[in-house]
Image (cartoon, rainbow, N blue to C red):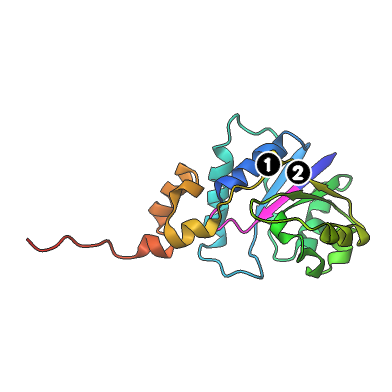
Amino acid sequence: MNIALFGTSADPPSIGHQQILQWLDHHYDRVLVWVADNPFKVHQASLSDRLKMMELTIAAIQPPPHSITIHPELSHPRTIHTLEQAQQILPHAHFTLVIGGDLVPQLPTWYRAQELLSQVSLLIVPRQGITIVSADIDRLISMGTKVAIAPASTSIPNVSSSDYRNKGNSSVIIPTVAAYIQQESLYAWQTSPAPQPPNS
């Protein structure tokens, strides 16, 4: 059984996340999704809010996905610990870790990277504006993993969660997530006082 492991900080989940998940749903037996705290980032929304937004993002995929499931128990800042937990859930599966092209250079510096890479294959999703350097791929292969690059059709749009966090750019997220953010007042721009009309 071929299992895709897709973890993200999802602060908030974007249309890029949804696009990747839709492609994975058609190419893997199962897709295990989790939301985690990134040790290299400061998060604005709580883990529980980000999990809810990811659930909304998956629920909006059309046609409805058949292989995607959310696993909060996989959430851990260290990916090796996530893998160990996934191996307990599906002990005989073959795991492919899905990462964005922007993470390729830093992956060898991750906690217990050699051990992690010896137990998974990698699927690298291209990101617009990011060049995947062959020397970085060679380094990953030398650490014991197999590397595949997803088709250009899955390329992550040149949008990011920070576009919404910092500017309120609603074009990068789906409407149900935008509504949830507004309802919960999750981001700084959302909680700033509304401008008052001038006195007449």
Q: Residue at x 38, y 60 (%)?
A: 190
Numbered disc 1: secondary structure: helix
Residue 182, percent from left and from top: 39, 53
* Pointer 1 residue: 154
* In this picture, residue 153 sits left or right of residue 135: left
* In this picture, residue 193 sits left or right of residue 4: left
Numbered disc 2: secondary structure: loop
State the separation of the CA atoms marked 1 and 2: 7 Å
Q: Residue at x 41, y 47 (%)?
A: 179
Residue 161, percent from left and from top: 54, 56
The magenta segment is: 5-12
Q: In which quarter of the image is residue 36?
A: bottom right
| Whether residue 117 is situated above or below residue 5 in the rendered picture | below
Q: Does the magenta stretch include residue 23?
A: no
What amino acid type is highlighted by mark number 2? Ala
Assess disc 1: are there few (<14), some (14-19) or many (≥20) residues with their C-alpha within 10 Å of its C-alpha. some
What amino acid type is highlighted by mark number 1? Thr
Q: Residue at x 76, y 35 (%)?
A: 27
Residue 82, percent from left and from top: 76, 58
Q: Which mark is residue 150?
A: 2
Assess disc 2: are there few (<14), some (14-19) or many (≥20) residues with their C-alpha within 10 Å of its C-alpha. some
Q: Which mark is residue 181?
A: none
Please say whether residue 74 is visible from this viewpoint: no
* In this picture, residue 12 sits left or right of residue 110: left
